Amino acid sequence: MKRVAVDIGGTFTDCFVAWGERYVQAKALTTHHNLAAGFNEALALAVAELGITTRELLGAVDSVRYSTTLGTNALIERKGPRIGLIVTAGFDSVVPLSRGRGYGDGLSFQAQHDIPRAQRPEPLVPIPLIRPLRERVGYDGDVLLALDEEDVRRQLRDLVDQGAETLVVLLANSVVNPEHELRVREIFLEEYPGWFLGAVPMLLSHQVAGRKGEYGRAMSTIIDGFLHQAMYHGLGSLELSLRDNGYRLPMLINHNSGGMAQLNSTDALQTVHSGPVAGIAASEHLARGGGIGHVIATDMGGTSFDIGIVTADGERHYDFNPIIDRWLVSIPMVHLVTLGAGGGSIASWDALLQRVRIGPESAGSDPGPACYGRGGRAPTVTDADLQLGYLDPANYAQGRIRLDARRGERALRGALGAPLGLDALGIAKVIRETVDHQMADGIATELRARGYTPEEFTLLAYGGNGPLHCCGIANALGITRVLAPPFSSVFSALGAGNVNQLHIHEKSTYTVLFHTGRKQVLTDFTQLNATIAELKQRGIDDLRRQGIAPAAVRHRVEFDMRYGNQRAETAVTYDIERFDGVHDALGLMAAFHRRYGERFGAGSQATEAGVRINTVRVSSFIEVGKVDFGRIDPPAARRPVTPLASRACHFVGHVAPLETRLYDERALAAGSFVDGPAIVTAAATTYLIEPGWRFHAAAHGAVWFTRDGATED
Amino acid sequence: MAADTIDTGGAALSAEERHLLDAFMADNRLFYGPDPAIMRNHRLAPRTAAEEAVLAAGLDANRINLVRGRLSSALEESFTMIEQTGVAPGAKWGDLVSSIFTAAGDLSQIGPRGIVGFATVSHYPVQFIAKYWIDDPTVGVRDGDAFIHNDSRYGNIHNTDQSMIMPVFHAGELVCWVATTIHEGECGAIEPGGMPSIAETKFDEGLKMCPFRCAENFQLKRDLVNFLQNSVRDPKLQLFDMKVKLHASNRLRERVLAVIREFGRDYLVATLRKTLEDTEAEVRRRIAEMPDGTCRIDTYIDSSLREHILAKWPLTVTVKGEKMIWDLRGACPELTNRSINTTLASLKTSLVSNLLVYVWPDLPPNQGVFSPIEVLTDRSSLLDCSDDAPNAMSLIPLFRALSTPSVLLAKFLYCMPKRYTAISASHYNQPATFVYGGLTQHYEITGNFCADINGNGSGGREDNDGEHGLSPTFGAYCDTGEYELAEEELPYLRIVAQKLTTDRTGFGKHRGGMGYEQIVTVKNSAGFGFMTGQCGAKHPSANGLFGGYACPAYPLAKIKDINIFEVMKRTPEQVKHGIAEYMNDPSIAGGRYLMQDAALNFEICQEGEIYMICQGSGGGYGDVLEREPWRVMQDIDEKLLTRDCAERVYHVRFDPRTGAVDEAATAAAREAERAARRARGVPFDEFCARWIADGPDPALPYFGSWGDNRGPVIAQPPGGARRVMPADGVTGVTIGNPRERRIAELEAENAALKARLAAS
């Protein structure tokens, strides 16, 4: 297999190249002014290692795949067109009011609670650019108030005159009956034909999000419109650059749904957070390929800690109303939780509860932890790690940053010495234990709310600080196996190279499977089957547009189901694409019953309150070839490695320092076996093997940590 | 008199006699009513022996912090379970809580999300169970039991909230309690939806569950569930959410036991107690930080939900050292046949919520917050009603308690060097939402309320304007929901879902956040109707601060005897999307255009009739003449303000064609207004002489003290005789039935007409 996968992050552009049996990784700084420059630099490093030219590489690969934070950055910087929004009259303030709660979307619990300081984000659509339209469609699709076409023309002209550069149309219940939204576009094209210079794009909400819920659908469409130009130009220039270098195939873009598609079949909204999601896709690939079972994927960097869930049953965990930046949207996005805990997280004293609090404030990379010597004075997790002896001051971040232990010590003592009554080492231990438990609590909440227990999981630890903290986190969770994955420094890029071409379409429905009052079970499946067929066809059309034969397309059908009028977001996968009889309805209810019970406890189900389907979702995909790592499970061989040296390190739960063996990158050779306490310092990260843990290197630089008493497989 | 003492007719008793009588009473108790010893005490319970022992042992503070983190994770998990699986709108939109209590029943910790008010009211029923049922041989408390409760007389915000309380045993010892609470809505009251405005006695309020066991061995008792289902309009809701709460509570219990396994029982006990004590100590420290002094504020409730009244809601706060006294004496007396009374416990809950939402949002929400504060009330007043008084719409005085104290405390806090949050004018403080009930288009009976209750505008702040339709006054990060989803479940249609209004905010240097209009009609139901339980149609309810205006008044409007769907088809140009547009052009043929008090007793809405209300604005902050002109112009651009209002209220001058501000003319206009203000002013004594009256106008339906809050309390029921009660002898007041009064008025008119006819 020959393939290039790229993850363009905020700081680095990571590149993973599969070239037959050889796998190469490369990193370059992201060049925001022209993404192609950073990408080409990373590619140049990779081809140099392979001993070929860029043109040779791009002429031979089966695909080039991107995941990118371009959209995320554009949102953060609020760089986008002036958007005009057309809504059903009476829904004028749905977007500005953001369901009330919008002020707190994307913020910490603490910020959400501070009502007097609540502040909604700078709007993507200012109120003067929102126009009501005289029309109304009922919940069931009935046209109640006919579209006032003169009103449409008037509002459109007015918005264009006001300088709107993109138009978004959100009409009530358009997902059930899109007639009015479609007619608005027809009128718009009559007034402003597409061949005019300066043509303004118009996005219809029902075409971006298929579910009911006007606010989420509006924000999905608005963000899509807001990012469209930046994404189109950024990715378009990348594609041109690829063409210049001999690549002839369509570029593939990773989506936050965990799939990918060609550029011409990608909504801008689908690319947001596609980088971290690609990391979860990589975890999924490893877990499936290696038979690892349930995996909790964690990415601990400098400022945050991302969590994703991969379960052995193949169920993909989605957020159907994720928060993007500060806005709730209505798209299926792979579930990803971010906690404010990383190496740069600041430790402070909470006088009220007499405790050390970690984050959410972060020193980031500038000024960074106190020990960076760049002006940071607040103590951070990295300062604690340095104090405890885990980091090599002369060889941190490949020697790019020299750590100053004295500055770190002063920061620890200055902020926390008096209230804790401890010396710097004692303080560092408190910070270490607190942050590890904080991350463990975050993971536990995520897993348990979905009906899983942490002990069933393997912890996958990547990101710059992942292997440094993984044993502590696992200890707090009762997890006995940790995997630092192969190519962990370019892990998201690796993931980008291993996803299927996939499109997800969904549609709201009000399908009562069991009406408890009437004691009726659904027997007429005409509408339900028509909905499934429509969504399948849309998926087939998407993939056919990308040159894929309909026969090759596979589908997975999911139903969002609920008891009574509850708000459960329980997605039930049911291996059926068409309902033929009441046995299918009963079977689906049984599957729902089972999944619900697993999640919320046996006996919590309430079929007697009625059962309903609220959303039908069809994933249409084709399986594409994956990068094969072979097996990355712990090798049979256990090759002891001679330590380079040792030093005294301090550990939570141990009063006296422990003599800790030190290793370098050579310990990552497959089969290497090390007992804790030990430290392996590699170019991209530091592996800390805590007392009671063992380190066993596997293929491609993967590392297994196992706790004493636990089996490796 | 305490519930468990006997009247000895004043006879002196020996200790032995007292003991004998107590034993006799215990054996012959008629009824376990609300216990004043529990219900009037908001202080932390004394340390138990077990707590003394573990705290004396000097446990590691850092491990206590780790336990706290574990409990927080467990509470969040339990909260998420309810939010995901609950059926009640309150559960879906954030009106719920999960909580952990000490063994003595003090609430120690709630989840990171949830309604903070529950954090200071949920302990009362736990303490009741601990006091009465543990040792009762016919009840007892065992592992696997769960108790249900809703009656606010035993502790709750109001009866529409239902709690599931579960003991946690470890090695046979009761180590703590856990509970989950949801605002359920429908509870079988005289009106659907759980908050009946026309309840005249407590027996009109529907379910009145004092704490009782509804589950054994982690299983609901189906016979009891059936009884409860039989007592409400929505049996599905009752069953389902009982299951939800039971499983969420049990999940929380399991996590607590896991914490014990990991850290030990001592750490759990120590953490729960220490969290309370640390919080209480911090509040004392913050009080001591404030300047000593006394500030007072009088506000008025303008409706009993049956008729207009002026009911006094006073508050005087005194700070001295680390003591803080909240004095609410002199309030409206208890209205014995109106639903807007509140129990003292519910009142305190709302007062402490104000502290946690608007003053110290960084504090951990638990019982320790309010423990150091002393509260003074008149017994049998609207704010401290008797157990017999109806209180189903206690939200009316409670929403004042949720919003008013911080406006007053701002005067203490303004000079403080440290800010725990921004100082702000009052959040809008009415439950401005439609309560509904009837038959749905899916042939189900329902009764509940719309999530618009979560869209109150916030007050203007010291550094910025208030935010539009932000959150309920009782909590944070709640949700107004999405109307497409609501219309799918319920037989109503929003003609206006959410539309910010014009010229209806609390003006100020920093204006209040605006509220939004809601216009609704019924579709596809043979019997569905609405009620509202709000005030503020005549007297503004959200106070301004430091010269800012209060919010305006918001009446309710409706158009009866029309079918708007026919209008949509035949004369679509008559369809409007604003209250003023409809009411200023009453042109739909046959329509009766009505404007009334903000309160609406439940009534059936025929298909196509229109009901209109407005969610309110927060109060303004600071003098309107200090508002930056660009903000005024932005408000005009956003249609929050008319040009006329900009000129008259803010005295901004601008080019009417371009909207460009004329800075010099604005400065001159404002200076002129300042001069006019000075000219209108009179010396203080002269003002007092002209302004102060001996008592309220006899035509005013006035309730409460007049002037001095410790003076006599006046009650002037509409159509009734005025009563004047001594400050220390307030008793309940009955108001006549409005329908009877109306009949009497019509009969009098009839008699007068007859007399005139006879005379002519």
Image: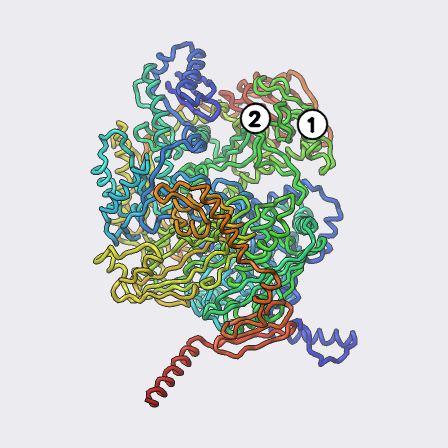
Can you give x and y, in whole percent of width and height, for residue A684 in the image? 54, 21
* Viewer can see residue A489: yes
Residue that carries the numbered disc 1 in the rendered image: A409
Residue A108 placement (x, y as % from top left): 53, 41
Chain name for mark 2: A
Q: Residues within 10 Å of mark 2 (few under 14, many from 20)?
A: few
Within-10-Å neighbours for mark 1: few <14, some 14–19, many 20+: many
Amino acid carrying label 2: it is Asp
Q: Nearer the viewer, mark 2 or mark 1?
A: 2
Front in this rendered view, residue B485 or B760 = B760
Q: Please give the name of the residue rendered at 65% of the width and 34% of the height, measured from the top-left corner.
A: A431
Q: Residue at x 39, y 83 (%)?
A: B747
* SS under mark 1: helix
Horizontally, residue B267 falls left or right of residue A110, namely right
Residue A225 x/y as whole percent? 34, 35
Q: Which mark is residue A366?
A: 2
